[in-house]
Structures are given as structure tokens and as C-alpha cells.
Image (spheres, rainbow, N blue to C red):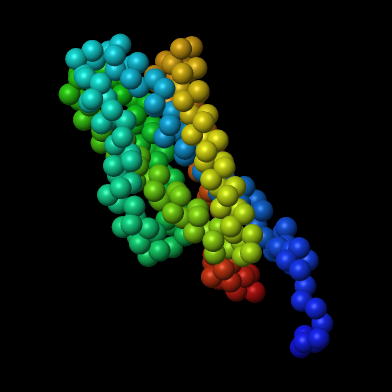
Amino acid sequence: MDNPLEPARSLKEIKEPMIVRGENRIGLAVILFQFFCSNMIVNYAFAFYPLYIDDNYPSISSFETGIFLSIPDFAILLFGIPIGELAIKLGRKTAIRVATITLLSSATALAFLTLVKNDKDVFLFASAFFRFIFGLGYIGVFVVGFGAIASDYGPNAGKYNGYGEGFGGLGLFAGPILGSIFYQYLDFFDGYAFLCGVYALCLIFVIFFYPKVKRDLQDHSDADQ
């Protein structure tokens, strides 16, 4: 019991631990890397899609292009809360894998849109559909990721959430730059294929190194005994 006559400690003396004992630092790195990759891909299209549409579909108006680019955000607006609730029901391991595979598969499908570039209607419908699906996977990645940080990293959770925002912001910054470079020196398909390869690496990290919930860790420990 504290001595009531002892002077209270100053706020400077009450320091938050830099590393909580037992923290999964590799798991945290995977979350941050996935935040970076997800935002990089979602912003990648903003640099070259308007140029690609102007070059191949001049009849598509600027307004239609703007609507097309905002489709992932529309998906987030409509399904952000339901997907958050679904992620809780599925559990972290299942939810993050489903979200990652959804995002990767939709981005891969977008890479193959060059196969239908002579058909305006098919291009618009397929682009809208797969970018909408992309938005659904994007929600899951961030809902599960920030939830994992909040539940697993104790007093450092606020700081690591800041890291998450920082890495996500870096992805938003890198996406348009890479998009413009790839579109100038490569082409539509090659640029998307490269990013899909990076995200496939991210999927591998998610499967093997994503932070497990305490219940999963306990079940694994019991199985080893």
C-alpha cells in the first residue's frame, strides 16, 4: 500500500513500457506491411486509370471516371460496419485470410482487363465489380489489423495504431508514384501484376506470421502437451 505521506510521482516518472513482455513484434510488422501494401494498391489506380481510359475509351466522361475511381470507397461506406461484425463472428485467423485473398484476387482480376479493352461496356462493368470487391477486402484488412493491435499490444496499442496510420499513409503516398512510373515504362498489365506479386508475398506472411489470438495460442499449447 502506498504511503499517503509520500509525494505523488510526476507524470514524467510514469513511463509507458517501450516493449511489453511477450509482444509479437513479427506479427506487428506483418500488420504494418499489409497496411502499406493495401493502401498502395488502392491508390495505385489514381495515377494511370484516367490516362488509360482517355487512351482507350475516349467516350467515357470525366464524371464516369471519377465515379469509377470512388467505387472502393463506396463499398467501404456501405459495408464497413457489417464486415466488422462478420470479422468478429469468423474469428481473426479466418477473417484476415478471407480479406487478404479477396483483395488479392480482385486486384489480379483488374490486371486482366486489358483482355477486354476493345469492349467499353465489359470494361466498365468488370472494373466496377472488381473494384467494389476490392473495397470489401480492404475493409477486412484494416478492421482485423487495428483490432489485433488494440487487443494484443496493451499499453502500446495507441502508439502502434499510430504506426499503422503512418505505414498506411506511406502506401497512399507510394501508390500514385508507382502507378505513374509503371504506366510510363511498362503497361497496364505488368504494373498490376507486379503489385499482385507483392501482395501475394503479403498473403504468405499473413498465413504464417499474423498475430494469433490468445485462445488460438492456448489451443496450440494444449495440443503440444
The spot of residue 122 in percent (x, y) is 20, 25
Residue 120 lies left or right of residue 73; in this view the side is left
Residue occupying the point 76% across, 63% down: 12
Quadrant of the frame with the N terminus: bottom right
Can residue 69 be seen? yes
Residue 31 lies left or right of residue 184; in this view the side is right
Q: Residue furthest right?
A: 6
The spot of residue 210 in percent (x, y) is 56, 53
User: 159 and 150: which one is in front?
Assistant: 159
The spot of residue 164 in percent (x, y) is 55, 47
User: 3 and 174: which one is in front?
Assistant: 3
Report which quarter residue 125 is drawn in.
top left
Report which quarter residue 44 is drawn in.
top left
Residue 91 lies left or right of residue 117; in this view the side is right
Can residue 211 be seen? no
Quadrant of the frame with the C terminus: bottom right
Task: Work out whether 34 lies above or below 48.
Answer: below
User: 178 and 96: which one is in front?
Assistant: 178
Task: Work out whether 169 lies above or below 85.
Answer: above
Residue occupying the point 34% across, 29% down: 110
Residue 93 lies left or right of residue 124; in this view the side is right
User: 102 and 184: which one is in front?
Assistant: 184
The spot of residue 220 in percent (x, y) is 58, 67
Residue occupying the point 44% across, 54% down: 143
